[in-house]
Image (tube, grey):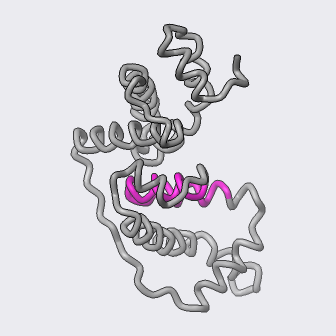
Amino acid sequence: MSKLSDLILIKRTLDGNTNAFGILVNRHQDYIYNVVIKMLRNREEAEEIAQDTFIKAYEVLASFKAEAKFPTWLFKIAYRKSLDRIKKNKRSTTLELVENLTEDASMDFENGLAIMLMEERKEIIKNCIQKLPEIEAAIITLYYYEEQSVKEIAEITNLSQDNIKVKLHRSRKLLYSSLENHIQPKILSENGKA
């Protein structure tokens, strides 16, 4: 049964087969958790919101329209629940815009990434994404890690596609700036300037 499509599993769930919904949960729980943890930055809260997402999805499953992909529909629920939690916690983040990246900084960034080992890069990038404001971290995660299109992210977040593009652009600049702090010392030590 685990090889059945999401739509068949949804139909079986609506027909009363709770095991079918369990398969949907197992299939999509990692994706949902990854988006939520990027927004909330707290493991316990992310686990709770991920569970709440599936509970809510189960309760309103009959409202799912096959026009959208099931994971997109789930992400939308998770995104809204995460925003609600952020508001509840009254978190505030300040978005620092980095308007100008010089060509040298971009070159250093690319050279630095080439010098680092693959695992180091992944860990550094993950840490830098976690330093982004919650919504931007979620958008970056959805776009690059979950391979969601701008249109799908717009559906999930209820933001316009143009707004998503702007947030992606700004988030990349912030990410580059943050990564520079990790890469610059590596470049200097490789060039014997440390």
Please, is residue 153 above or below residue 183 in the view?
above
Along the viewing direction, whichever of 28 and 11 lies nearer the viewer: 11
Q: Position of residue 177 (x, y in %)?
A: 50, 75
Vertical order, 110 against 42 (above or below): below
- Measuring 39% from the left and 33% from the top, which residue is drawn there? 45
Can you give x and y, in whole percent of width and height, for residue 94 in the image?
A: 29, 64
Is residue 156 shown left or right of residue 144? left
Residue 189 position in % (x across, y down) = 72, 79
Residue shown at 50% from the left, 11% from the top: 15
Give the number of callouts.
0
Q: Is residue 93 above or below residue 1?
A: below
The residues colored magenta run 122-144
Magenta stretch secondary structure, dominant = helix
Spot occupied by residue 169 in the image (x, y as percentages of width and height): 47, 73
Quadrant location, the C terminus: bottom right
Quadrant assignment for the N terminus: top right
Which quarter of the picture shows residue 106?
bottom right
Is residue 152 within the magenta segment?
Answer: no
